[in-house]
Amino acid sequence: FQESGNDNSAELKVRVKNVPLGNPLVPGDHGVVRLKKQGLERTLSTQNGKVSFGNLLVGDGYTLEVSHESGSTVYDLPLEYWGSKENFSIEQPASVIEFTRNMPYIGGVRAFDGKNFALYSGVETGNTVRIHLLVRNPNQEKKNVKVFLKLKNIANGQSALLQESVVVDGQGDERVILEFPAGEEGIYRYAPALMLNDGSERFTDCWDWVEEPLFSVVEEQKALDFAGYRWDVKAGFGHPGPNLWSNHHEIARVSEEGDLHLSLQKKNGHWFASEVVSQKKFGYGTYTFYLKSDPEEYCPNVVAALFLFGDNENEIDIELTRWGNPENPYAGNYVVQPSNIPGNHYRFPIELEGSYTTHRFVWKPGKISFKSWHGHEREPEPHLKIASWEYTGNQIPQNREMRLHFNIWLFRGAAPAQPRKYSLVISDFEFIPKN
């Protein structure tokens, strides 16, 4: 068979697409398309997801194989086999094929400790993490695949490989459960992959290390006592931020004087934030917070917050931050969520006189009143006032019980320009229920 250069020659144009719900930018320039027929084999790389084969004879018997350069350093940069189109015809003057990946791929990965999603709560050492991988098969025929999952503890770089074989029905989904014994505390990143289980050792999906960790392992779930209440200490990875969260004593503790110390600091090359969450739920009433921290000394993308949280639309916040902008003169923020609604956010300068401040909000039906002042007087003199604001908008939480949170973290997860330890110190908290 010879390629044709005469008037009977034709052109084949191929556009390669990812799975229907996949990244529309993939394959971009990383697709590999191989055209075959007896006596002919040509391979081209995609440009913006497209290739064009010229000088082809009109006729049938052509086969197209499509692969993708994975970019996965975890699995040594293999090609992902995305599938083939068999025995098709090319017509004059040109034929066009819209090729969509038709080999099994990974639809999602989650980890559980038996009760909860293990990323945010943390799994205690000695327990087993159950990792669920969703495998999707867009092909008409059932496929037998090997499922791989590499895990890496970011604290010490140690890794583990889990694997399982599964048969996925044509145009079907299959959930694979892998078990990992949580013997060592740390935060674990992950990289899954699929390989056809037919002896060809062809990967069909292959990920590099995912930036967002999969689960956290802690020595134990921790809680502490402060201001007459019991507080759970957060561990794992997630929002706000997103951030890594630690429950180690040096990150979150109560001092001998009874002050709550929450820290933001770098350990083992990673920044760790801290948060405590009240075990008690609170309702309407007066909330007063006594701070020993100067937020004006924070790097602009450090955030300290005192807030009631029910969900993203039922939240009341006092936030101390410049939101990453060193030119922002307003380090104080009163917020009723959602904050993107006009009128739900009030900003103010703090201009401290020393490092002691008091902050309060009063939550009532139809109104939330905020106030901040210098010092730790329970009722301030007028000259001590920093700011005040009343909110009477439509997003006031109804009389539902919500947990109270204190935290210090990095805005958008970005490391501070001044790499030192930052602290939120709360000397006391008072709650007076509404009569």
Image: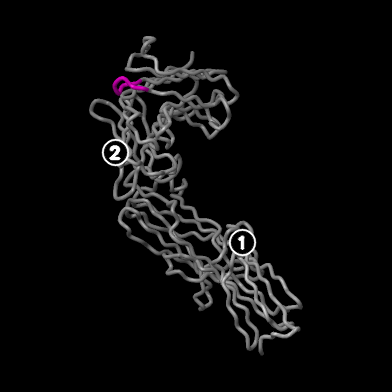
Q: Position of residue 141 (x, y in %)?
A: 64, 71
236, above or below 303, in the image: below
| 1 and 2 marks in contact (CB < 8 Å) | no
Residue depicted at 36% across the width and 9% down the height: 381
Looking at marks 1 and 2 on the same chain, the residue that comes earlier in the sequence is marked by 1
The residue positioned farthest toward the front in the image shown: 6
Tally of numbered discs: 2
Q: Callout 2: helix, strand or loop?
A: loop
Disc 1 packing (10 Å; few <14; some 14–19; many ≥20): some
* Residue 5 x/y as whole percent: 69, 85
The quarter of the displayed image where residue 26 is located = bottom right
Q: Which residue is mark 2?
A: 421
Q: Is residue 130 magenta?
A: no
Q: Is residue 59 visible?
A: no
The colour scheme used to paint the residues is one colour
Residue 19, numbered circle: 1
Nearest to the observer: residue 431 or residue 290: 290
Q: Which disc, if any, is residue 51? A: none
Could you tell me residue 73's position as x and y percent? 42, 65
Q: Quadrant of residue 274?
A: top left
Relative image position of residue 329 (x, y in whole percent) = 42, 28
- Along the horizontal axis of the image, is 93 left or right of 362? right
Q: Quadrant of the N terminus?
A: bottom right
At horizontal 73% and vertical 85% (from top left) the residue drawn is: 6
**Disc 1 vs disc 2: which is toward the camera?**
2
Q: Callout 2: few (<14), some (14-19), or many (20+) C-alpha neighbours within 10 Å?
A: few
Q: Which SS does the magenta portion mostly show? A: loop
Name which residue lies at 34% across and 45% down. Answer: 271
Q: Is residue 97 left or right of residue 254?
A: right
Q: Give the residues drawn in magenta, as a range.
A: 351-357
Amino acid type, callout 2 = Lys
Q: Is residue 253 visible?
A: yes
